[in-house]
Image: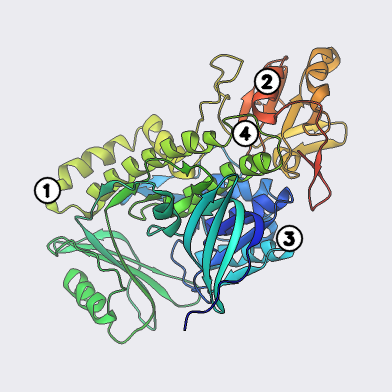
Amino acid sequence: MTRPVVPVRSCEVLIAGAGPVGLMLTVQLRRYGVRVVLAEQLDEPTGESRASQLNARTMEILDECGLLADFGPAPCERIGHFGGLPLDVGGVDSPYAGLWKVPQFRTESVLARRAVRAGVRIRRGHRVRAAVPEGDRVVVTVDGPSGPVRLRCRYLVGCDGGRSTVRELAGIAFPGTDADRRLYRADVAGIDVPNRRFERTSAGLAVAARRPDGVTRVMVHEFSRPAGVPDEPPPFAEVVAAWRRVTGEDIAAGTPLWLDSFGDGSRLADRYRAGRMLIAGDAAHVHMPIGGHALNVGLHDAVNLGWKLAAVVRGRAVPGLLDSYGTERRPVAARVIADVDAQALLQLGGPEVEPARELVRELLDLPGVSARIADALSGVDVRYDVGADGGEHPLLGRRLPHEVLDTAAGPVPVAGLLRDGDPLLIDLSGPASGSVERDWAPWAGYVRRVPAAVRPGSALAGLPAVLVRPDGHVVAVSGAPRTALERWCGPPAQHPLVSINGGSHG
């Protein structure tokens, strides 16, 4: 007998998927008091490590959002890689240069706790099944433990992975390529094998990294094996056999804690929005997990989308603001996919790629080349087309450098100025601040203005003012920022919106 559908409930934003991306988006929306329902099909968190590192830009974002302290201390490695070739990322211009070793389950746990503290109930065992646009709402049917539930929301966001149901319901195409190469990955307890960093043998590639808790992460690829990647995790015996063929070692006595296989296929959604349905993270882009890009890019999607969606829900957005989410983030994903595809060729190709590997190895010794790739791996190279006044200034569209500014309250790190989630106008004009202040005045209830002075060597030196979006990206560097204020901060002279944290959020 079919169970009856419960009466329709309502919310402002329904998010499908309580992985790191869905949780980060939830946290961002709650900063502005948006009513969120978070639906997750799994009954419990997986507890799997999966992605294991956060890059410099992610660490900056966590600091800007006041989340970094919740993570506690984390090991940091200076040396990353490009296609298995060593790459120094410790010289990136960031206080968090390097790759920070944080397993995915820890990231999920921290974000879940913050979401719950913000008043969100994570509805586990709930899967989105249908979505029908109705005027200015989307009516979504969710299958839950007690039967179907109907939710009427203003926006539906799919953070539900590479096989996203929301993406399919929205009719968003997901073109790309299937895998040509396969790699096994497993966390194994009770084995004693040498640590390996992308060791190539005549038969394939092997990686082994022993964690402080004694568990070893192994990865193995065979040059001669077929490419198909199954939907289910591989049997441990299959991983053991592949490891033996590539390294000559036997890990059969170990206890597998997590098993996975993946290939070098990649897909990119042709758009990130279809009306009132949007996608983020793996729902929008998938690729081989090389260099820790996937998790970090997904978190950055959530931060870009969060403040924009909140502004729309709260009536503070100008037309086109929400569309800028896709126009800004999709090119970033396309570039990452191209980068990862190049790395996969170098890392998983057989003996035929050795000449190319040798050439890339030599190129990485050139400071300009290594710096460019290190910036990309660290996520600090992103530059959006913000259509700003100020011409071609190198800061426009980029994230605000993490410096210390001198203010009336004393020295303040940039991250501290961004923590309340408001747009930020840094007034550097000193005694001649009249024009900056006049332009800013109609937005005084929403945009935070901070008179400040820079220190020697600052990237902001010589600028009269810098307007920064809530996601930390610079959109104006002139002493007359009114045009940028209108574009990114909505109409002037509106009442501010109060967030659940007591700040002023429009």
Q: Is residue 493 above or below residue 157?
A: above
- Check disc 3: other Cα within 10 Å, few if <14, some if 14-19, many if 20+: some
Look at label 4 and name its amino acid.
Answer: Pro
Secondary structure state at the residue bearing disc 2: loop
The residue identified by callout 2 is 461
Image coords of residue 59 (percent x, y)? 59, 50
Look at label 3 and name its amino acid.
Answer: Ala
**In the image, is 449 to the left or to the right of 75?**
right
The residue identified by callout 3 is 118
Of labels 1 and 3, the one closer to you: 3
- Check disc 1: other Cα within 10 Å, few if <14, some if 14-19, many if 20+: few
Look at label 2 and name its amino acid.
Answer: Ala
Of labels 2 and 3, the one closer to you: 3
- Check disc 4: other Cα within 10 Å, few if <14, some if 14-19, many if 20+: many
Which of the marked residues, 4 or 1, is nearer the chain's N terminus? 1
The residue identified by callout 1 is 352
Which of the marked residues, 3 or 4, is nearer the chain's N terminus? 3
The residue identified by callout 4 is 401
Residue 66 in view in this figure: no
Look at label 1 and name its amino acid.
Answer: Glu
